[in-house]
Image: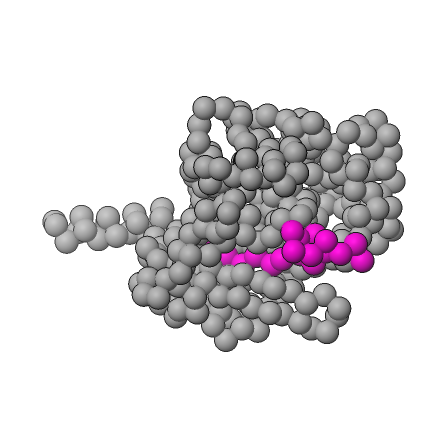
Amino acid sequence: MAKFLLGLTNLFIILFFPFICSASEYIGFKRIHYDIQDGRPLDIAVWYPINNKHGAVTIAENAIFYGHDVTPDAEPKISTTKYPLALLSHGYGGSWQNLSWLANELALKGYIVAAPNHPGTTIFDRNIEQSSKLWLRPQDLSKTIEALIGNQTFSNIVNFNQIAAIGHSLGGWSVIALSGARFSTNLFNQDCKIHSYLKGCHLLSELGLANSELNKSMLDPRIKAFISLDAGLTRGFTIESLQEIKIPSLIIGAGIDLDDTNVQLESGYLQQFLAKSSTTYITIPDAMHFSFIQMCKTNAIEILNQEKQGEGIICKDGGIRQRSEIHSEITHLVVNFLSDTFSNNKN
């Protein structure tokens, strides 16, 4: 009887916790330089489960933000199943470091996580020649998949039938476009005449938001789910294209608006037109737009405001909870959503 019960327990674990065997206590980290000679080389960060933390170092830390420990170039943890893949897309003026906290959590749960720096729209690279080619941002994520397919470390351990794309702010726009939403420059520019205060409307030239290339499909059918974290520019997506998206989506909005954000107009627009049967919509009441990026150090607001008055908003949240608590809630939502999604897609 004991053996029978043990067998049932093991079966329950396999059926209802499909990634538990791949979870890890430690995280490996690798940088990939991917250049296919198209004038847009990518710097890609990859997190993945490993067996121990020997040789660990701290990454993504500076005077403003806390980092986390990883082991560079360690051997991946051997798993009986291939690892699902999560792609991360940072916001305008950010970098892969901004969502490194989430990458860390997902790697601990048994995911391989890959995040490119999007040329022209990072804190290190504000090149308008690149930033004004916004349609290339979703393609950066497709190229990231290709980089992993061609990489000796990852090509045989990633389940390329289980890929989710996650993005914050402009990264949210990028993963929605990658999932099949069609942008209309005319629709967006008409909307900016009404809602001119929204951040995206101030970036018309920097992001090339009148370029007809943006009206073309950016769909990558390999994406099986997407998550947007307080996405921007969403009002340029056509209603018809949003209604046609069939893959599961998780839309998380910040409950407290900034002067140039509006969760009802942006994330709420997605909720209104994405398929109700495959969309989960959540607003976190005490989150602000930058609650989705890294944990800030104690004196970060003072340092940021000294550099430029008002920049301290990056480290402010909207309630009594610490950002770490908001991150815990986001992690819970994301992990549960992905687990449910990939449990139903075991190819």
Q: Residue at x 52, y 44 (%)?
A: 64
**Residue 33 in view here:** yes
Answer with left or right where residue 209 lies relative to residue 334.
right
Q: Residue at x 76, y 53 (%)?
A: 131
* Residue 27: percent from left, percent from top: 39, 59
* Residue 336: percent from left, percent from top: 44, 41
Q: Residue at x 55, y 35 (%)?
A: 302
Task: Judge whether 308 appears above or below 258 on screen.
Answer: below
Q: Quadrant of residue 163?
A: bottom right
* Residue 168: percent from left, percent from top: 61, 43
**Residue 164 in view here:** no
Q: Residue at x 44, y 69 (%)?
A: 73
Q: Relative to the observer, which residue lies in front, 69 or 243?
A: 69
Indicate whether residue 116 is drawn in magenta. Answer: yes
Task: Judge whether 34 appears above or below 118 on screen.
Answer: below
Task: Judge whether 243 appears above or below 343 on screen.
Answer: above
Q: Relative to the observer, which residue lies in front, 347 or 324?
A: 324
Q: Relative to the observer, which residue lies in front, 164 or 139?
A: 139
* Residue 278: percent from left, percent from top: 58, 39
Q: Which residues are magenta?
A: 111-129
Q: Quadrant of residue 253?
A: top right
Indicate whether residue 317 is drawn in magenta. Answer: no
Q: Magenta-highlighted stretch: main secondary structure?
A: loop
